[in-house]
Amino acid sequence: MNEKNYSLSAKLYDKLHAGEVEILAGSLKKYFFDLGISKGATILDLGSGTGTLLGQLSNHGIVEQVLK
């Protein structure tokens, strides 16, 4: 898939799942903290979507830096 098509697809995907990612990030925050994973931890996310979830986890202080 070329970059232009991926960009359009990613935008549509994010709109389709709007709101769900924020709820999932909140649930994962509790789950990670319950496991002892603290703020600033490094989380590797490879090829699993548009990066929106990592951005939300970053907003919760789970991830210090999101690489694009």
Image: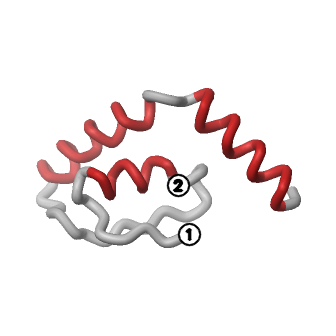
Rendered residue at 42%/54% (across/down): 55
- Find numbered disc 2 in the image and state the secondary structure of the residue it sits on: loop
Rendered residue at 24%/69% (across/down): 41
Rendered residue at 51%/30% (across/down): 18
Q: Is residue 62 left or right of residue 25?
A: left
Q: Which residue is mark 2?
A: 51
Q: Measured along the vertical axis of the image, is residue 40 above or below residue 9?
A: below
- In which image quadrant can residue 36 be found? bottom left
Residue 29 drawn at (x, y percent): 23, 47
Q: Amino acid at mark 1?
A: Lys
Q: How far, Cα to Cα, is label 2 from label 1?
A: 8 Å
Q: Measured along the vertical axis of the image, is residue 11 above or below residue 66?
A: above
Q: Which residue is mark 1?
A: 68
Residue 12 drawn at (x, y percent): 70, 35
Taking depth in this image into account, of 25 and 11 the one nearest to the observer is: 11
Q: Residues within 10 Å of mark 2 (few under 14, many from 20)?
A: some
Q: How many marks?
A: 2
Residue 4 drawn at (x, y percent): 84, 55
Q: Are marks 2 and 1 in contact (CB under 8 Å)?
A: yes
Quadrant in the picture for the N terminus = bottom right
Q: Amino acid at mark 2?
A: Gly
Q: Is residue 58 left or right of residue 31?
A: right
Q: Is residue 52 left or right of residue 24?
A: right
- Find numbered disc 1 in the image and state the secondary structure of the residue it sits on: loop
Q: Is residue 31 left or right of residue 19?
A: left
Q: Measured along the vertical axis of the image, is residue 42 above or below residue 47?
A: below
Rendered residue at 53%/54% (across/down): 51
